[in-house]
Image (spheres, rainbow, N blue to C red):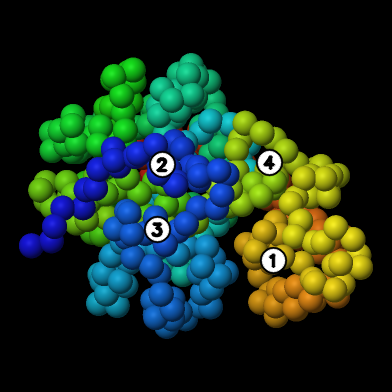
């Protein structure tokens, strides 16, 4: 019998080198996150080359850049998902967003860009949860403001280009109830107060809304939470997410077999670094730490040139002699996320790392890449109207009136 998935994160000691939770990501003395230690602590597995090659073989597609370059680097039971797919069995995708800001930054786009690739490659249905209730409780937002931000964020998510005939986007304030709520209760009954405190680190100062929230994020992992889509089919779920969300799904995986469901599988990403350096993930509270999808070309150029931490040397002479430190250089790291051409990236690695390419040149190339990305996203978002969000993606109308279309997902 498999041992429990749960590991208490309560054992955070003063001298702990790093903290990674759904609400905090930090490394000791502002250092880098050690992902090998994180894998060991959380108990997930490294995503190895054999799995990446298997994805390519099964989908007849080149692996996504986020797979090729290790952005998505860890998993839980991803091999089981591929086993099921190879046998002709069905699965679905589940990801989400906590809407706490008006616009998304590039770090927020990472899971959605990768999820679109998975949906296109495997031709599977997708559910996207907007946890407006969570942000209402954690960010001290009003219910109405949380709902408004959810609708705005939904436009950015739709603009990523998902197959809308296979995609169900819902906000918790709009959708929670019925079969979804029944599963929440089933999960809640299986997790003691001591256990949830151990997993998430809640204290006596936290209100009860926080303590009661984890089942809300857990149950989209179960197909019966969406009877209008999946009926009575108990199919598997794959969750693409950043690794800071792992505590939620360790809890979910521990509970799932006890209430008759498959454990959800996960494929997990590292954090997208702030412009100022790789010391965790971008912060929506500091607009100069991030490139937003609403930034103009001028703003992108200004942010990259002024704030992007450089691994170049202090003088041209020293740079030509020693080359750039690619381990800390943010422009090079960003190109690793968004420059799809492997040959060009390798050329930049050689030229910049040797000192033949200067900091201004790599920043110029990054400005071009990000300006193109943001402009394409802006055009796609402009086509998403409030009426579209309300009618097709984000209201009770969508799941009451699109049942026939959604049933086709499982054909």
Helix, strand or loop at disc 2? Answer: loop
Disc 1 and disc 2: Cα gap in Å? 29 Å
Label number found at residue 176:
none
Front of the two marks 1 and 4: 1
Front of the two marks 2 and 3: 2
Q: Quadrant of the C terminus?
A: bottom left
Disc 1 and disc 4: Cα gap in Å? 19 Å
Q: Earlier in the sequence, mark 4 or mark 2?
A: 2
On screen, 398 above or below 46?
above
Rendered residue at 50%/46% (across/down): 27
Q: Is residue 85 visible?
A: no
Which residue bears the numbered disc 1? 326
Classed neighbour count for the residue bearing mark 3: other residues with Cα under 10 Å, few (<14), some (14–19), many (≥20): few
Which residue bears the numbered disc 4? 289
Front of the two marks 4 and 2: 2
Q: Position of residue 98 (x, y in %)?
A: 47, 36
Q: Earlier in the sequence, mark 4 or mark 3?
A: 3
Q: Position of residue 398 (x, y in %)?
A: 41, 39
Helix, strand or loop at disc 3? Answer: helix
Rendered residue at 11%/46% (across/down): 259
Which residue bears the numbered disc 3? 37
Q: Left or right of 77: which side holds 107?
A: right
Which residue bears the numbered disc 2? 15
Rendered residue at 75%/50% (across/down): 308
Q: Position of residue 310 (x, y in %)?
A: 76, 56
Q: Quadrant of the N terminus?
A: bottom left
Rendered residue at 45%/46% (across/down): 18
Disc 4 and disc 3: Cα gap in Å? 26 Å
């Amino acid at each position: 019998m498999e041992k429990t998935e749960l590991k208490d994160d309560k054992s955070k000691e003063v001298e702990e080198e790093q903290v990674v939770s759904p609400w905090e990501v930090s490394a000791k003395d502002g250092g880098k996150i050690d992902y090998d230690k994180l894998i060991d602590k959380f108990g997930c597995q490294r995503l190895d080359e054999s799995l990446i090659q298997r994805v390519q073989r099964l989908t007849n597609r080149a692996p996504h850049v986020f797979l090729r370059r290790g952005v998505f680097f860890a998993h839980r039971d991803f091999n089981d998902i591929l086993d099921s797919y190879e046998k002709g069995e069905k699965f679905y995708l589940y990801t989400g967003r906590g809407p706490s800001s008006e616009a998304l930054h590039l770090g927020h786009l990472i899971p959605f860009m990768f999820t679109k690739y998975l949906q296109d490659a495997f031709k599977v249905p997708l559910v996207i949860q907007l946890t407006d209730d969570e942000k209402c409780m954690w960010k001290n937002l009003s219910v109405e403001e949380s709902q408004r931000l959810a609708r705005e964020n939904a436009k950015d998510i739709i603009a990523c280009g998902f197959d809308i005939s296979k995609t169900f986007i819902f906000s918790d304030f709009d959708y929670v109830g019925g079969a979804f709520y029944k599963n929440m209760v089933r999960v809640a009954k299986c997790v003691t107060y001591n256990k949830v405190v151990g997993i998430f680190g809640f204290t006596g100062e936290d209100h009860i809304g926080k303590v009661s929230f984890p089942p809300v994020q857990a149950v989209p992992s179960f197909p019966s939470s969406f009877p209008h889509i999946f009926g009575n089919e108990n199919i598997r779920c794959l969750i693409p997410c950043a690794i800071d969300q792992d505590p939620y799904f360790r809890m979910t995986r521990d509970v799932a077999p006890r209430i008759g469901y498959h454990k959800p599988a996960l494929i997990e990403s590292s954090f997208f670094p702030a412009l100022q350096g790789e010391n965790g993930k971008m912060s929506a509270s500091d607009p100069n730490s991030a490139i937003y999808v609403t930034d103009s070309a001028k703003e992108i150029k200004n942010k990259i040139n002024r704030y992007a931490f450089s691994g170049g040397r202090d003088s041209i002479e020293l740079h030509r002699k020693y080359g750039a430190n690619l381990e800390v250089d943010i422009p090079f790291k960003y190109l690793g996320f968004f420059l799809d051409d492997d040959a060009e990236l390798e050329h930049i690695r050689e030229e910049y790392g040797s000192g033949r390419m200067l900091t201004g040149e790599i920043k110029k190339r990054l400005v071009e890449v990000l300006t193109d990305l943001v402009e394409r996203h802006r055009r796609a978002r402009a086509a998403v109207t409030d009426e579209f969000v309300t009618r097709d993606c984000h209201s009770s109308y969508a799941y009451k009136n699109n049942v026939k279309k959604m049933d086709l997902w499982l054909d």
